[in-house]
Amino acid sequence: MDLEALVTARVAAVAPGATRLLVAVSGGADSVAALRLLHESSYSIVAAHLDHGLRAESADDATFVRELCGSLGVELHERAVAVDAVAKERGWNVEDAARRIRYSHLHRSAVAAGADVIVVAHTLDDNAETFLHQVLRGAAYPSGIPARRGMVIRPLLGVRRSVLRDYLVTAGQTWREDPTNLDVTRARAWLRSEVMPLLERRYPGAAVRVARAASAIGDARRVIEGQVAVRFGDGPLRVTALSRAPRALQRGAIAALLERGGVSVDTDLIEAVMEAVRTAALDPHAGPWRRSVADGQVVRVAYGTVSVARVAAGALEAPVPVPDLDAWRAAVPSVMKAGVTAADLPDEADIEALASTHGDLVLRHRARGDRVRLPGGSKLLSDLLIDRKVPREERDALVVLASGEDVLWVAGVPLGGARSRDQRFMDLALEQARAAADAGELPVGAVLVRDDQVVAVGRNRGQETGDPSAHAEVEVMRAAGVATGDWRLTDATLYVTLEPCPMCFGAVLQTRVARVVYGASNPREGALGGVLDLRAGRWKRTPVVEGGVRERECAALLTSFFAALRAD
């Protein structure tokens, strides 16, 4: 297949049905070759050129392109823009400004000319150089240049730069040389003029193999992106689900999340997020991880999710009094504008409890002298933020709930003052315990949770069923097995109002529950320290155990139950 037929076939492959093409012509050899090759094809051709004004020779380049198109009878859409002035006005990097303005001109010209696609003359060598540049910059998915993106197609990606120059020489066609291509202070020019020739001398055909590697990685990336979309959707990522996925899908999911958030994706950032996810999965009580990125955004691993939020300093124009729940509900939209997520917010029961204890509260940004009351005493909020590694640029934007100088809640920074997630789930278990008491059963309730979602609830049912094994823990694990279709409850947390007995702890071991949280100690039958501690056995795996959550409420319910029995 000759060169013309090869390029024509490639256009048909990447842009089936296209009949009218706009060719981007800079005046360089590659774009001139693309214009001539496609002019000789069956496609209808129109050209576009941008005089960027960045070099003294740019006007001569424009003249060359104008004369070339005139000789070929090709319609030309040209524009001159002082790119450096635009870049300065808008605060853009000059190279970035040139790229943006060029592609804007190309798209407008394509629409005006009725072109189906835009042809850009990137070659196999460009693809190899781009791939190496991406690798060296730490790109998450170094996959070179895509053959098509939107209206832009690149039918010369499989053609060597030298082949195009040989074609032009044979045709007697001249071209323009860009002297910036020889400026080795520029990364791309250095790769082109020094690195790639060195690789070719040591490994003949290196550019071809590098370009093939880029293409293969691009194919793999598209497969991974498809799997990520099906498995994780397009919202915040759940830590538990992410940590269970293969590492390739973890990287893909994190990369997709960052891209949706407008964050520049690189391997260093992805690896940092993956390590934070691993830590959070191993320790559900680990404090939030956060990293500031460009444009006032922060990437966070907190409250069981990975998210990208925008930190907007001054989102609260003035302190907002929170005398009651209605005032709190009205204030929440302003809080959310400051980069706070729904998971960050204290629930309404927390607000009511804090207001009853401290009086009227104020929602505001942090202030000098703010202190936080912690279990070991009080501490300056500024010191706490340093300890929690909250970046300096985020601190003044943080939203706090305070009574005077006493800070009771900080968005995204656990203080221990509001009810924890464990306490909230234990409240659900208490509801089940009260239902058991109402039914004449020993008031013990249980809830099984996975990925912060309630899988099943249960309560004591021994009297009702005549089954001595119908303890709340066993009931909830049975229900969870039915709900999930799997008796293995790996990664689940069991909340129960009373320390489990030996029978129930045995069921916990059998079902592989990862964590047990109980309320009141069980001095009669407790298997986790109340009477004995079965965790000391030589088990293959044992759950993480935490006791004393809502202990007073759980114990009071049992005490009142037995008091009623004695009264009868």
Image (cartoon, rainbow, N blue to C red):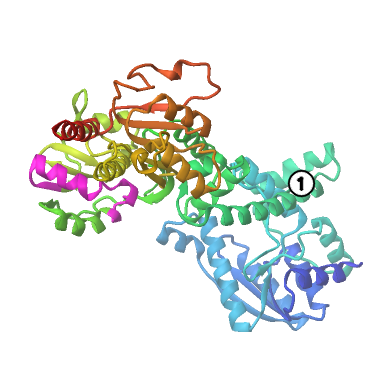
User: Residue at image x 80%, y 46%?
Assistant: 209
Mark 1 crowd level (few <14, some 14–19, many ≥20, 10 Å Cα): many
Left or right: where 463 falls relative to 262: left
Please name whichever residue, 479 or 376, is drawn nearer the observer in this view of the structure: 479
For the C terminus, the image quarter is top left
- Which residue is labeled 1 in the image? 210
Q: Can residue 506 be seen here?
A: yes
Q: Position of residue 17 (x, y in %)?
A: 74, 79
Where residue 111 sits, quadrant-wise, is: bottom right
**Residue 371 among those drawn in magenta:** no
Nearest the viewer among 106 and 71 is: 106
Q: Secondary structure at mark 1?
A: helix
Q: Say whether residue 338 is left or right of residue 294.
A: left
What is the quadrant of the N terminus in the image?
bottom right
Q: Measured from the top left, where is residue 38 in percent x and y?
A: 79, 74
Q: Does 478 appear above or below 65?
A: above
Give yes or no for residue 340 being in the magenta stretch. yes
| Residue at x-position 29% and y-position 20% | 523
Q: How many marks overall? A: 1
**Residues rendered magenta in the picture:** 336-362
Q: Is residue 368 left or right of residue 47?
A: left
Answer whether residue 304 is visible to the viewer in this image: no
Q: Quadrant of residue 47?
A: bottom right
Where residue 199 sits in the image (x, y, percent)? 79, 39
Give amino acid for label 1: Val
